[in-house]
Amino acid sequence: MTTLNDQGLLKSASYWQGAWHPAAEHFAVTNPANGDVIAKVANASPADAEQAVTAAAAAFAGWSALPGAERASMLMRWHQLMLQHQDDLGLILTLEQGKPLAEAKGEIAYGASYLQWFAEEAKRVYGDTIPAQANNQRIVVLKQPVGVVAAITPWNFPNAMIARKAAAALAAGCTFVVKPAQQTPLSALAMAELAQRAGIPAGVFNVVVSTDAAGIGNVLTQDKRVAKFSFTGSTKIGKQLAKQCADSVKRVSMELGGNAPFIVFADANLDAAVSGLMASKFRNAGQTCVCTNRVLVQQSVLAAFTAKLQQAMTNLTLGDGTTAGVNIGPLISDDACNKVDELVRAAVKQGAQLHCGGERQSLNSLFYLPTVITNVTSNMTLAQEEIFGPVVAIQCFSDEAQAISLANATEYGLAAYFYSRDIGRVWRVAEALQFGMVGVNEGIISNAAAPFGGVKQSGYGREGSQYGLNDYLDIKYLCFGGLDN
Ligand code: SIN
């Protein structure tokens, strides 16, 4: 790997109980931009995952007993260390995940912002008092940490998805075990190194890296010592994991797939809509759960909007994320490229019109050309499934009612976007969209202050914001009686 300023951030083994644990077998981490092996990492087993849970269970009593302000100081130190090492963390992220360096550094700042946000929230785990129904009683509500939290996180945001969950869990007083995606273990391990440097006690933050997703997943979802399970990933896997959690009645949060509509009404500022779409569609080469999946454009502005969009897309430079000027990287794997390609080809076969792209940059490369297709209809698979690639699929609508109906015609409900300058329409459409998050004249909606999460088959639970701690807290009600004696 290219030399880091701080080589100590490059770790190659799982971390639990405050120590690094070698394994007999190793797996390769490759750079999707060129296929180079950038590291070999110790492959943890399900028995290792059990040990990590043991460490988290043992650390829980001490960590949860600390005053919130003390947990807050450690989270703040972790936040500062992440920012201090933003360049190195960004480089590690680009090398294992592929996103351009500027975007990778942006993700580090985004991840760190959750540590800061929840450090602040750690001091504000307020309970409640409730007027009792009898004069001789008083009702008090306490909020207490749920216990050990386990998480499985995806490859598309190898830093921020861990930070978003761990920050809330640790702030609440929980301890944490995460299994990051096997494609991107290095970012997670670098976070563990910085957690250790920040003084977070042994057993509080643990990382298990492995290619045995099913085996580790079984431990994290079935071990009775784990009180809460949090997952970000596909709806298909999320359903399976949720079923596995049922036997031990775990608290579960699921941040699953999306199928985001991006509606452009004829009264929209078309330039603003194009720049919102560029951000929402091409962030991480289209590989985010909140990326625009279906672009719905009102018939009367279709030609003008498509022309402006194609003009804006001439600014996209595809390439290795470490190269200056590159703003769109490779897809994560060959399978990912094949899937995007199949979706595009199938749509074209069914009558969609290809304007640009529609293929890999060159044979076997993981770079998929930014693509625009029009005449897309709701029955096409790419309008029903997450594309997870740099493909703008445009459908046309005639009026507001049709736009809303097309937008909601999906089993998913994570993010939606629309552009309009009519205040009445803004409220009507915002309220009618069946999604957990709606960008109104805005293409990038994720930030630490906002509640991130979906409805329908996009999952449940919220991450970030004032609501984010609730997923990690139990409510305990105290009834004080006999106060008239
Ligand atoms: C995701 O793709 O799951 C997360 C994207 C975000 O946090 O904006």
Image (cartoon, grey):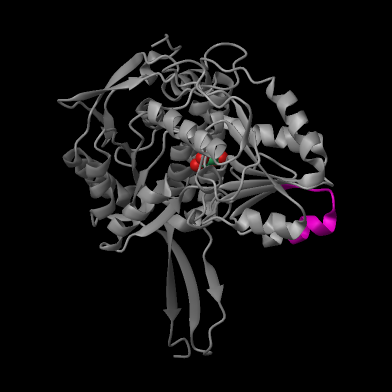
Q: How many marks?
A: 0
Along the line of sight, which residue is nearer the eye, 183 or 126?
A: 183
**What is the quadrant of residue 271 in the picture?**
top right
Q: Is residue 147 visible?
A: no
Q: Is residue 438 visible?
A: yes
The region drawn magenta spans 418-428
Q: Residue furthest left?
A: 24
**What is the quadrant of residue 14 in the picture?**
top left
Q: Is residue 63 above or below residue 393?
A: below
Along the line of sight, which residue is nearer the eye, 241 or 409?
A: 409
User: In which quadrant of the rendered image does the N terminus lie?
Assistant: top left
Where is residue 235 shown, x and y percent of the image? Answer: 42, 50
Where is residue 297 shown, x and y percent of the image? Answer: 73, 44
Q: Residue at x 44, y 16 (%)?
A: 363
Q: Residue at x 55, y 33 (%)?
A: 286
427 in the magenta segment: yes
User: In which quadrant of the rendered image does the C terminus lie?
Assistant: bottom left
Where is residue 107 shown, x and y percent of the image? Answer: 54, 30
Where is residue 214 shown, x and y percent of the image? Answer: 25, 43
Is 303 on the left-hand or right-hand side of 184? right
